[in-house]
Image: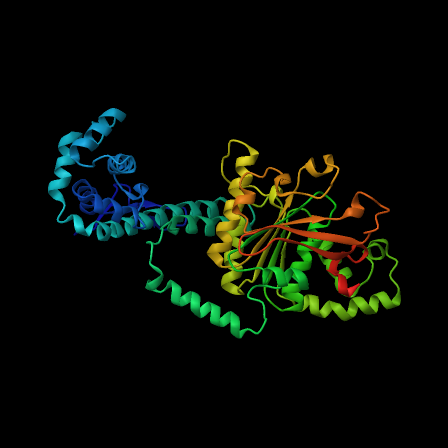
Amino acid sequence: MTTVVTQRPDHHEEDPGGGFHRSVLPQNIEGEQSVLGGQLLSRDAIADFLGSPMTPADYYRPAHETIQQAIIKLYGDGEPVDPITVAAELTKSGDITRVGGAAYLHALVQAVPTAASVEYYAEIVHDLAVRRRLIEAGTRIQAMAWSGEGEVAQVSDAAQAEIHAATEIAQAADPKRPGEGSLASTIDELQAIQNRNGELTGVSTGFKDLDLLTQGLQPGQLVVVAARPAMGKSTLALDFARACSIRDGLPSVFFSLEMGISEINMRMLSAEARVGLHKMRSGNLTEDDWKAISRRTPAIEAAPLFLDDSADLTMLQIRSKCRRLQQKHGLSLIVVDYLQLMESGKRAENRVVEVGQISRGLKKLAKELSVPVVALSQLNRGSEQRTDKRPQVSDLRESGSIEQDADMVILLHREDAYEKESPRAGEADLIVAKHRNGPTATITVAFQGHYSRFVDMAQT
């Protein structure tokens, strides 16, 4: 099968960089015809197509994409798929003339060498489609670079996003029996857990009881930490990051869409040195305070904790930054503070839909990088309107699919935020309201707001 490269008349047009711009689009029309012809002959070939990395958008000829969509529709409806039924479907949609008529569909069947090779043909067509997208992405990247607009870092992030979008493959793995390797891998995993002698399987949160319940934050998990404003969401998330990077030396990244880096650093110093945050802000530090800060500063500086306080971050930007950090340093934890301040980067009919897109994007990021992602989220006023102020999962603000996408939901609650004379002053509840891989429970920790941290009750 011959790969054809289409070259347009303007291929010697000089580009802004002083070289020559050649507009070439790789394609293989025979391959496309064979993919379609095979499916018109065999339903098994349609299943092969759907199991391949190829999508209808990978066709070079728009008419072929239209035919493929008709095949998929008929197949999904459980209807017969052949030149006659596809022609009827395309006639109904008004597309039959545009694709070349019923005669072209019959010609496709005659052109295919064998329906059994559709998956192989589909890989060829998909590879050429990726090449076309890379060419188009390269053109856009050149245009961004030549325009001189935006910061270099922003252009770099956008360029990486373009490359990722051009090469991303959404392919579902074929179903497998446990005997085809998955069960053996699970047994190996169980043996490895047994040999750990109580060591965590995930990243420690820094809280003993929470770690016992969850076995740590697991790779690929989306963990949502939710609370009403001023409960300490950011403080708790920073506690997770400090335990990961300062205490355990594992790389993490903290995206703060609310606080600046200076504020984050001040909170870390307060928590690590046990120097009052108010004293720092008011400039009332004693000599002992300065000594405590000096003792903990080297550990904070050496920690592989990456901070990003960029405003209006989109899901694409976060994904791009995390991918670069993963390549350079490896990542053990990603924290996003907080979800409702993010932008999806896509058009959405309302904010609930957009927040749903963001939560799905964060879950996808966790799975893609095999790293736990902790996303902070606001709760609505539902809990404040109840006699019992303890939050519930249903209180998630602009929830959309947050609860559905999350592997774990931790609701943060402090009784003394509502009752200043509460007998539980200084205590906080970490309500594990959803735990996909384990039990739910409420864990009580101590809130040391003056040090900007939570700690285990045993440490108080």
Q: Residue at x 79, y 58 (%)?
A: 451
Would you place residue 122 above or below residue 196 in this image?
A: above
Give the side of residue 204 with respect to residue 279, left or right: left
Q: Residue 104, percent across and down? A: 15, 34
The answer to whether residue 20 is left or right of residue 154 is left
The percent coordinates of residue 147 (x first, y second) are: 49, 44
Judge left or right: residue 238 versus residue 83.
right
The quadrant of the rendering that contains the C terminus is bottom right
* Residue 292 locus on image (x, y percent): 81, 68
Q: Relative to the observer, which residue lies in front, 207 or 32?
A: 207
Where does the image place residue 214, in percent across and percent down from the top left? 59, 60
The answer to whether 155 is drawn above or below residue 77 in the figure is below
Q: Image quadrant of residue 384?
A: top right
370 versus 387 height, above or below? below
Residue at 49%, 38% (x, y): give it: 346
Q: 364 and 208: which one is in front? A: 208
- Is there any visible trace of residue 404 in the rendered image? yes
Identify the residue at image location x=48%, y=50%.
364
Q: Is residue 268 left or right of residue 129?
A: right
310 or 273: nearer the viewer: 273
Which scheme is used to colour this image of the protein? rainbow
Regarding residue 149, the answer to whether it shows in the image is no
439, 31: nearer the viewer: 439
